[in-house]
Image: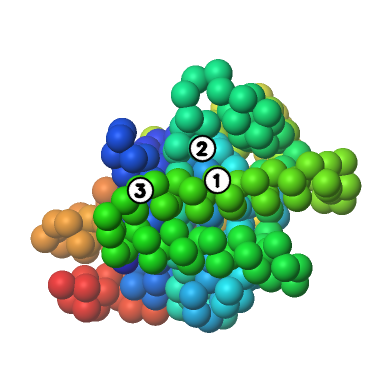
């Protein structure tokens, strides 16, 4: 199944239902070129995530880190971690994603698996993700396990739920052992819990007020810091300026309106915080290589 967009709320939390309460896992393929935006925007969710690249190259952004993965390389992203995926080469990039409720690994509440092997990994804020480069045998086996899960999920043969659970537990064991071996050896600084909440506050404010005129003073006031500190802090973790992010978000919301309504371009522009239609068209063309009208026609 191809995912074309990811619904998120004002806190940038993904609101997709991943699987069912009886079997809480979602497995899907994402072709960034077919995605509504051409990339997967910043979001987070309680589910853990496993991804591997199918073709071309994909750039994953995790907190303030950015890494490019190639075919047959993968990544594990922990629970409640802000992340984004973009094309590494301007456009395109295909990867398979698996969103797994930790309950599927924990089993019943208070189990030894939860206490000893799952919770310590998810509570370790110094390990928001783990890259699977395919250089070591265990990394290649981890990606192979992901491919097995993908095939099982697609075919849905008799007992596939048990086979998937077995494969996931085997994969988790390898990740757990690797993370335990490398504990305390991380060289890169990571986002603290406080910083993570600050970023979410800023994003939440932008998402709630993107259709209005927003000033830097208003944004900085949400996290009680100076304007300069707010800019430095945001750029450090998000990799772009606050107003670049605001522009991208306005374009994102306008794209949704272009596809979901028949509103004239001028109405879409004013609803998304653009003061003039001409400025909106200019910015949209810069981001999407097409005018709003051309984009709408090509997607319908």
Report the disc number at residue 105. 2
Q: Position of residue 189 (x, y in %)?
A: 81, 45
Q: Are marks 1 and 2 in contact (CB under 8 Å)?
A: yes
| Cα–Cα span, label 1 and label 2 | 6 Å
Find the distance from the CA under tag 3 to the CA under tag 1. 12 Å
| Residue drawn at the location 75% of the way across and 72% of the way down | 135
Q: Residue at x 55, y 37 (%)?
A: 80
Q: Which residue is mark 3?
A: 161
Instruction: Give the spatial CA distance, label 3 vs label 2.
Output: 13 Å
Residue furthest left as drawn: 262
On the rendered structure, is 46 left or right of 82? left
Marks 3 and 1 close (CB-CB < 8 Å): no
Residue 98 is marked as none
Q: Which residue does the image show at 37% across and 61% down from the upper left? A: 152
Q: Quadrant of residue 199?
A: top right
State the residue lying farthest toward the front.
Answer: 158
Q: Secondary structure at mark 1?
A: helix
Q: Quadrant of the N terminus?
A: bottom left
Q: Residue at x 50, y 79 (%)?
A: 55
Residue 169 circle label: 1
Element class at badge 2: helix
Q: Position of residue 70 (x, y in %)?
A: 61, 76
Q: Is residue 246 visible?
A: no
- For marks 3 and 1 on the same chain, the one whose residue lies earlier in the sequence: 3
Q: Earlier in the sequence, mark 1 or mark 2?
A: 2
Mark 2 neighbour class, 10 Å CA radius: few under 14, some 14 to 19, many 20 or more: some
């Amino acid at each position: 199944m191809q995912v074309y967009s990811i619904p998120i709320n004002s806190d940038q939390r993904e609101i997709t239902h991943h699987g069912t309460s009886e079997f809480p896992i979602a497995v899907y393929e994402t072709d960034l070129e077919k995605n509504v935006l051409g990339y997967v925007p910043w979001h987070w969710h309680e589910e853990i995530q496993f991804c591997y690249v199918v073709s071309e190259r994909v750039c994953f952004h995790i907190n303030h880190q950015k890494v490019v993965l190639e075919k047959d390389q993968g990544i594990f992203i922990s629970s409640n971690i802000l992340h984004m995926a973009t094309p590494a080469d301007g456009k395109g990039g295909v990867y398979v994603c698996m969103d797994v409720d930790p309950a599927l690994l924990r089993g019943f509440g208070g189990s030894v698996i939860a206490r000893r092997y799952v919770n310590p990994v998810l509570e370790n804020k110094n390990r928001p993700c783990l890259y699977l480069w395919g250089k070591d045998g265990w990394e290649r086996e981890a990606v192979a396990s992901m491919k097995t899960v993908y095939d099982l999920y697609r075919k849905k043969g008799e007992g596939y739920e048990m086979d998937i659970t077995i494969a996931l537990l085997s994969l988790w064991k390898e990740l757990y052992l690797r993370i335990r071996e490398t504990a305390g050896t991380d060289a890169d600084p990571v986002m603290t819990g406080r910083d993570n909440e600050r970023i979410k506050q800023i994003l939440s404010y932008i998402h709630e007020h993107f259709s209005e005129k927003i000033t830097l003073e208003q944004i900085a006031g949400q996290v009680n810091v100076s304007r300069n500190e707010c800019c430095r802090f945001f750029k450090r973790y998000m990799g772009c300026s606050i107003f670049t992010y605001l522009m991208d978000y306005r374009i994102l919301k306008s794209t949704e309106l272009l596809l979901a309504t028949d509103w004239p371009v001028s109405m879409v522009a004013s609803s998304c915080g653009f003061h003039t239609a001409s400025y909106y068209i200019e910015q949209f063309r810069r981001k999407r290589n097409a005018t709003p009208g051309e984009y709408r026609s090509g997607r319908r």
